C-alpha cells in the first residue's frame, strides 16, 4: 500500500519554541518537518499544526510557522495531550452534509440520509513529543478510522528510548511508519510529476 497524494493531509504536532531545544536530535527533526510543509505546499496537501498550551510552551518555531503560513495551513491550539480530545478530528474531517432543498420538511422515513463529506482520510503525522502528544493523537485518529502515517525522522522525544517505544506502539496499533523521503516519492509517484524537480531539491537538501 502506497501513500495517496489526493487523500493526504499533513499534521504537525507541537513543534514549539520552548519544547524543541529539549528534543533529542531536534535540529534534524525540525529540518524534516520544514521539508514536509514545503512539499505539502508544492503538492497542494492541506497542512495543520497543533500547539500544546502555547501560553506556557510558546508558539510554533518561527521558521516553521512561516512555512505553514505560506502553505495556507491552520493552527490548532489545545490543552489535552491528544489533539483529537480537543476537537481536531472535526477540523480534519468536515461534518456530513445535510439534505438540500425541501428534503428536511418530509417525514423522517422519507428523508434521505446526510451525505458523507468529501474529505481526505489519510493523515501524514509528525511531531513532538513522540511518546506523549503525537502518540495519543495518532491513537485517537486511528480510533476515528483515519489512516495514520507517522514520519519517523520528523518525530522526536526528549529521549531516544521514549521515541522508539512510541514507534513500536504505533506500529502495533496499525499506523504506517515512513520517512520524509518515502512521503516525498510516494506523493510524487513519477519523475514526470510537474513538481518533481522542486521536491527533489528538498530531498537532496536533507540528504
Image (cartoon, rainbow, N blue to C red):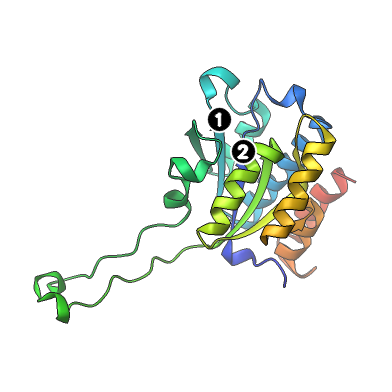
Extreme residue toward the bottom, this view = 110
Point out residue 128 in the picture as x, y percentages from the top left corner: 68, 36
Helix, strand or loop under label 2: helix
Q: Is residue 131 left or right of residue 145?
A: right
Q: Is 23 situated above or below 97?
A: above
Whether 172 is drawn above or below 11: the answer is below
Q: Does 83 appear above or below 179? A: above
Quadrant location of residue 133?
Answer: top right
Mark 1 burial class by Cα count in 10 Å: few <14, some 14-19, many 20+? many
Alpha-carbon distance for marks 2 and 1?
8 Å
Residue carrying label 1: 52
Left or right of 173? Residue 121 is left
**Residue at the disc numbered 2:** 133
Q: Residue at x 74, y 57 (%)?
A: 171
Front residue (pair 13, 145): 145
Q: Secondary structure at mark 1?
A: strand
Front in this rendered view, residue 34 or 169:
169
- State left or right for residue 62 relative to residue 1: left
Amino acid at each position: 500500500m502506497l501513500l495517496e497524494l489526493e487523500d493526504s493531509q499533513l499534521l504537525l504536532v507541537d513543534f514549539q519554541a520552548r519544547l524543541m531545544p529539549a528534543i533529542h536530535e531536534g535540529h534534524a527533526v525540525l529540518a524534516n518537518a520544514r521539508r514536509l510543509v514545503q512539499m505539502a505546499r508544492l503538492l497542494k496537501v492541506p497542512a495543520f499544526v497543533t500547539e500544546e498550551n502555547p501560553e506556557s510552551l510558546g508558539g510554533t518555531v518561527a521558521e516553521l510557522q512561516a512555512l505553514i503560513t505560506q502553505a495556507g495551513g491552520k493552527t490548532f491550539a489545545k490543552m489535552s495531550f491528544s489533539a483529537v480530545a480537543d476537537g481536531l478530528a472535526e477540523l480534519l474531517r468536515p461534518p456530513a452534509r445535510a439534505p438540500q432543498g425541501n428534503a428536511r420538511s418530509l417525514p423522517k422515513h422519507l428523508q434521505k440520509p446526510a451525505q458523507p463529506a468529501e474529505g481526505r482520510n489519510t493523515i501524514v503525522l509528525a511531531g513532538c513529543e513522540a511518546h506523549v502528544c503525537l502518540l495519543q493523537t495518532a491513537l485517537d485518529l486511528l480510533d476515528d478510522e483515519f489512516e495514520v502515517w507517522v514520519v519517523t525522522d520528523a518525530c522526536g522525544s526528549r529521549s531516544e528510548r521514549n521515541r522508539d517505544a512510541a514507534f513500536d506502539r504505533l506500529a502495533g496499533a496499525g499506523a504506517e511508519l515512513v520517512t520524509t523521503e518515502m512521503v516525498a516519492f510516494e506523493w510524487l509517484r513519477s519523475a514526470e510529476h510537474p513538481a518533481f524537480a522542486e521536491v527533489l531539491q528538498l530531498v537532496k537538501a536533507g540528504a
